[in-house]
Amino acid sequence: SEAIGRRFGAIRHRLQALIDQRAEQIAAQKRELIGQVQALQNDSEQPLATRITRTKQLQQQWRSLGRAPKGEEQALWKTFRSACDQLFAQRDAHKHEQANRLQHTLDQLQAIIDEMDGWQPTQADESERLDTYLASISQLEPLPRNRRSEGMQRRLSGIVRAKRERLSRLEIVGQVQQWHALLPLVNAHLHADQQALNGEGAQAVEATSEISIELTEAFNEAHQQRNHARLSTPLPLSSEQQSALEEQLARLRVHLSLLALGSVKQRDEPLRLAIQVERLNSGIHTERSKADELDEVLVALLALGPMPHNLWLQEVNELDNLLSRLARPPQP
């Protein structure tokens, strides 16, 4: 029995030695893990998110190792946990800083949106201010994706759409006002046309004698075209020429009606369809605004001639009514 006891004691001693040896190996491995975590704390080359992921992996390795010698385990654990906590504190501080930064960004966006909402442009040339607002907003991007941000962006889209519509309306009002300023020139052309049609001689109209404003390039070309038509068209007008003028004038009136009302009279449906086809074909190559179309109509009105006075009288009242509708300033 003594021999058995001695053998058992020897086995127990060797087993304890193996346990102690393994515990020392675990302690060494844990010290290595501590070193890795501490190195991650000051590793500026890796993103913080990558270092946090690596720290969590090291924690899993720690848990899988077992225990170090009894006198070391608690001290090693405290050191390891402290190093991990410092990294997690960096993460939390970064999240807090990021949240504050995003909050500040949204506050800035809110201020711009509120200012835009209160802004009511009164002139078409104020479109630059809208561009300035949008440029300021673009500097805040990328915006955070959350409910507040999404709600603000929906509101912003509505405001931008409303301001662009208002600026477009103001541009049209300005175009009609410009046309009214050109009426002395228009009337001078009508008078010169009728004189020529009456056989009293074709004369060119001098724009500077009729108006004090400078013609735009498009209106100046139309003015020259009107003079050229008067001076070069064989007179008297044939029935075909008069019909062509009547159709062109009616087409311009219908186009103006589409711009002012969005609809036309039943008798003008064929002309409306022709204009819609023309719009579609033009839109394939370039996008035209309502203001662009109005400018084309007014330029064509100035260029159209020689215009018989009675033909002009048939359309002028409706033309004036449609232009008056377009000249109404948008409501705030």
Image (cartoon, rainbow, N blue to C red):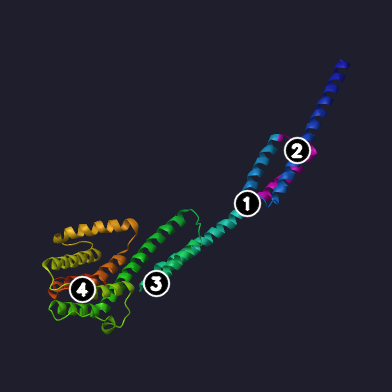
Left or right, 88 with respect to 105, comes to: right
Q: Position of residue 235 (x, y in %)?
A: 14, 73
Would you name the residue on which mark 1 appears?
91
Q: Which mark is residue 191?
A: none
Q: Position of residue 129 (x, y in %)?
A: 43, 70
Q: Residue sitting at 48 percent across and 65 percent down?
A: 136
Would you name the residue on which mark 3 appears?
126
Q: Position of residue 194 (x, y in %)?
A: 15, 78
Most extreme residue toward the bottom, as rendered?
Answer: 209
Q: Is residue 174 above or below residue 29?
A: below
State how far apart marks 1 and 4 are (Cα). Answer: 83 Å
Of the 4 image quadrants, the one containing the N terminus is: top right
Amino acid of disc 2: Gln
Q: Residues within 10 Å of mark 3 (few under 14, many from 20)?
A: few
Q: Earlier in the sequence, mark 4 or mark 3?
A: 3
Amino acid of disc 4: Ser
State which mark lies toward you, 2 or 3.
3
Q: Earlier in the sequence, mark 4 or mark 2?
A: 2
State which mark lies toward you, 3 or 1.
3
Task: Specify the principal SS of the magenta part.
Answer: helix
Q: Is residue 75 magenta?
A: yes
State how far apart marks 2 and 3 are (Cα). Answer: 70 Å
State how far apart marks 3 and 1 are (Cα). Answer: 46 Å
Q: Which residues are magenta?
A: 65-93
Would you name the residue on which mark 2 appears?
29
Q: Quadrant of residue 221?
A: bottom left
Q: Earlier in the sequence, mark 1 or mark 2?
A: 2
Considering the numbered disc 3 on the image, is that residue within a helix, a strand or a loop? helix
State how far apart marks 1 and 2 are (Cα). Answer: 26 Å
Q: Which mark is residue 232?
A: 4
